[in-house]
Amino acid sequence: MILASAGAASSWSLIIWVVVLVVFMYFFMIRPQQKETKKKNEMMASMAVGDTVLTTSGFYGVIIAIQEDTVIVEFGSNKNCRIPMQTAAIAEIEKPESATTTTATDK
């Protein structure tokens, strides 16, 4: 009888530890990744022609055309370097100064 109650107690403590581990993983691994994915999707949805972008390889450029999953980015000061790239290669988007000041004064 004593052995049966000790086995039941250890199985309950194991279940509690597993639940604690799952909750820990959710709050420290899964949830932050979901937030970051949501932020990136919102950034990609707000992308427009004329925005300055930073690519994942570290190049700054200006978007001159947007297609479904491809954007054409113009690099350099000579305006002759136009490269099509996937939207996944964009790390950051910066709105033009005139558009940001206009929306800030409208509010």
Image (cartoon, helix red, strand yellow):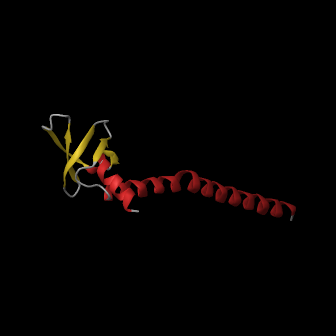
For the residue pair 19 and 6, the one nearer the viewer reads as: 19
Q: Quadrant of residue 48?
A: bottom left
- Residue that appears at 20% across and 35% down: 76
Residue 32 visible to an observer of this rendering = yes
For this view, does 26 lie left or right of residue 11? Answer: left
Q: Residue furthest right?
A: 2
Residue 16: x %, y % from top left: 70, 59
Q: Is residue 80 above or below residue 8?
A: above
Q: Residue 23 appears at what percent x and percent y?
A: 62, 58
Q: Nearer the viewer, residue 79 or 68?
A: 79
Q: Which quarter of the image is occupied by the N terminus?
A: bottom right
Residue at screen point 29% across, 44% down: 53
- Residue toward you, 30 or 90: 90
Residue 17's image quarter?
A: bottom right
Write the residue at 36% across / 54% down: 43
Q: Is residue 42 visible?
A: no
What is the total number of numbered labels drawn onto the structure image? Answer: 0
Q: Residue 103 or 38: which is nearer the viewer? A: 103
Place of residue 58 in the rendered image (x, y in percent of width and height, measured from the top left): 32, 35
Quadrant housing residue 2: bottom right
- Residue 58 located left or right of residue 36: left
The residue most toward the front is 105
Q: Please identify the quadrant where the C terminus is shown.
A: bottom left
Residue in the picture at 56% in, 56% down = 26
- Residue 104 drawn at (x, y percent): 39, 56
